């Protein structure tokens, strides 16, 4: 079992879209995957057709764990369109504050995920667009991190700041965590500006960029609005093709990283 966070502090960069469609692609390849929604906005939960007021959600289990009870995440896993999800709810926003005074506040999620390890090949954690305690919990529970970045604005600054947090957490709380890759999303290979951003990212962070980029594709947004992954919604779309390529590349990178350990 490997746990992978989709994380970067900027919203709208493709974390949730990547979580849902990478999970669906890996599942098509015969892997068992669990999605965990860590964002109080509950975009992933809603993109799988649930509301933002699901009860019990990850919030209620975090509360149990904060109160010293053993929270059983497996009890709240929902199956939506063939994908398995630990849902978020708006209440999760409160967890950021409530966690502050809890001992071992950075390790709660890692502890809660441990009993699920035998059941899943991959657990994908969809992080909120900020580096608060929820994202820190995700990173502490992770083996790998994928950072999606949008080609529309200069992402280098945000990436520098994310890297600083990543390094600190790696040094102090989770030595096994590694970067799996940087994913360009909403990319148009014909646009000069997009090509330039790609070159700058590659120069600034050699080896990080996935060869696969996710093209701008309205079908991805439509699928999300319809509460489906892109393979169920429109299997012949560019979005489906790109995310299938990504899943293949992710598996390849995992194999070569595991070998080099
Ligand atoms: N490749 C893409 N082409 C077109 N729209 C996209 C693409 N990727 C994501 N979107 C849309 O952009 C918005 C933000 O993406 P999202 O994955 O929710 O970002 P994040 O989780 O990082 O905030 C969503 O409405 C989503 O449907
Ligand atoms: Mg999101």
Image (cartoon, rainbow, N blue to C red):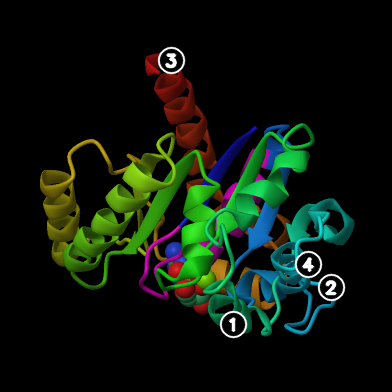
Q: Considering depth in this image, is 95 or 255 the residue closer to the camera? A: 95
Q: Mark 3 — residue? A: 259
Circle 4: element type: helix
Residue positioned 18% across, 52% down in the render: 201
State if disc 3 and disc 1 touch (CB < 8 Å): no
Q: Mark 4 — residue? A: 64
Q: Which residues are magenta?
A: 7-26
Residue 188, given in percent of the width and then of the height, sits at: 30, 61
Disc 1 to disc 4, C-alpha distance = 16 Å
Q: Mark 2 — residue? A: 56
- Single out the mark in the foreground, 2 or 4: 4
State if disc 4 and disc 1 touch (CB < 8 Å): no
Q: Mark 1 — residue? A: 93
Q: Considering depth in this image, is 152 or 108 the residue closer to the camera? A: 108
First in residue order: circle 2 vs circle 4: 2
Disc 1 to disc 3, C-alpha distance = 39 Å
């Amino acid at each position: 079992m490997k746990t992978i966070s989709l994380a970067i502090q900027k919203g709208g960069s493709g974390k949730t879209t990547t979580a849902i469609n990478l999970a669906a692609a890996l599942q098509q390849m015969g892997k068992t995957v669990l999605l965990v929604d860590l964002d109080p906005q509950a975009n992933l939960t809603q993109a799988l057709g649930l509301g933002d007021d699901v009860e019990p959600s990850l919030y209620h289990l975090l509360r149990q764990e904060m109160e010293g009870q053993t929270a059983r995440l497996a009890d709240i896993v929902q199956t939506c369109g063939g994908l398995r999800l630990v849902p978020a709810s708006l209440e999760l926003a409160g967890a950021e504050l409530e966690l502050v005074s809890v001992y071992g506040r950075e390790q709660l999620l890692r502890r809660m995920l441990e009993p699920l390890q035998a059941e899943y090949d991959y657990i994908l954690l969809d992080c909120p667009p900020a580096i608060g305690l929820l994202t820190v919990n995700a990173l502490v529970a992770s083996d790998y991190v994928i950072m999606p970045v949008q080609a529309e604005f200069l992402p280098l600054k945000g990436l520098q700041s994310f890297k600083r947090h990543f390094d600190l957490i790696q040094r102090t709380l989770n030595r096994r965590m590694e970067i799996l890759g940087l994913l360009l999303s909403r990319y148009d290979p014909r646009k000069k500006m997009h090509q330039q951003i790609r070159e700058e990212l590659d120069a600034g962070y050699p080896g990080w960029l996935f060869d696969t980029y996710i093209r701008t594709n309205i079908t991805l947004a439509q699928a999300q609005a319809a509460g489906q992954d892109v393979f169920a919604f429109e299997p012949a779309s560019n979005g489906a093709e790109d995310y299938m390529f990504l899943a293949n590349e992710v598996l390849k990178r995992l194999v070569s990283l595991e070998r080099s350990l």
